[in-house]
Amino acid sequence: MAARAAHAAFLGLALAFAAGPSAADDAPPADTTRIVVVDVDTLPKGELPSLPAENDAPTGVPAWTQPATITVTPVGEMPRPQRQGKPILHPAKTPSTLSHRAEKVKIVSIAPTSPSLDAIYAPSNDATELEAQASQKMSCGERESVLPMRWEALVTGADGSARLEVHDLWFDAKSCAVGPGPTATVSLQAIAWEAGRPWLYAMRSRAGVTLVMPRVVEISSESMVGTPVSVRGDFTRITMPVGRWGSGSIVAQLESLTGHDTGDGVDRSVEVGIELVQTMSEKAPTLLVRTRQARVPTSDEGSD
């Protein structure tokens, strides 16, 4: 009963979105709403690797150990931050002082050698929303500091298959080099399509469901059985925890389901709602995916 009630409530909400207010004859085309129901038990199984721990860091990273898949490129310099100390009245402007003030810190860009759909970020066990980039700028210096980095790359196939490649990296600020860490690959399954092309992929793990979609403008999520974790780079990856007698939801705003601008001046922004529900009587959770795509006329169309 609880499962039917949860599903009925979600479908009722989706139908309400689909119906909307009645449109006049000269109004733009109505919103397009689609609903997809997915049995999580049919998704491929995989496990995202654990984040690297601080005690896993090497003592240093020689430049020659840098993986061929990553390129480190100098992009500029910035003044070295001055250390805070006791104030000095009327300091003498000696040559050594001026030289110290003129010291610069080298800035490098860390990026994939062959860019695709990438997300590079500094991992944190405490963060639940991670903002990633296709490349990351880091500062070099004399300090001995080896920092963890994670690079996720989404690889899609013409047949609709996809995989998520996860690379752990170590950035050594002293040698200004990147060292390799463990790598892992997980398979994804397409569960939603637009114009014959998949845009939403998923996999299941022991404790949750991982969803991958185009980069979002806005996203919010909640779960009754844990904390969702999202990464936003060239694509968006969000992992939802799963538990009996629990549910979770995602609401996202996308610029488009294709992941790029069509260039025709038409706004095809999409609202995405995802519900993950599992009751005590169900062996596996159910995913309910709703997309609402509105076609907003251009300024020229609106003036007619």
Image (cartoon, rainbow, N blue to C red):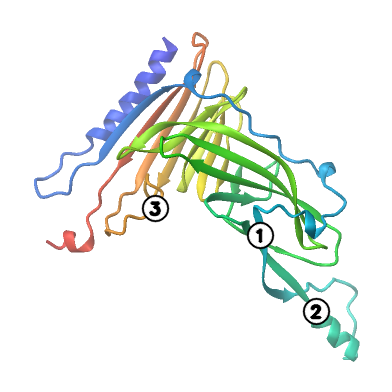
Give the image location of residue 33, x and y in percent. 28, 35
Q: Residue at the left extreme?
A: 25
| 135 over 160 or under it: above or below | below
**How many discs appear?**
3
Secondary structure of the residue carrying tag 3 is loop
Which residue carries the number 2 mark?
103
Graded by Cα atoms within 10 Å as few (under 14), some (14 to 19) or many (20 or more), the crowding at tag 1 reads some
Which residue carries the number 1 mark?
71
Q: Residue at x 85, y 71 (%)?
A: 84
Considering only order in the chain, which callout, 2 or 1, is on the residue closer to the N terminus?
1
Instruction: Say left or right for 30 vs 133.
Output: left
Compute the Cα span from label 1 to label 2. Answer: 26 Å
Give the image location of residue 108, x and y in percent. 69, 66
Amino acid at pointer 1:
Thr
| 56 over 207 or under it: above or below | below
Which residue carries the number 3 mark?
260
Q: Residue at x 11, y 45 (%)?
A: 24
Secondary structure of the residue carrying tag 2 is loop
The quadrant in which residue 51 appears is top right
Amino acid at pointer 3:
His
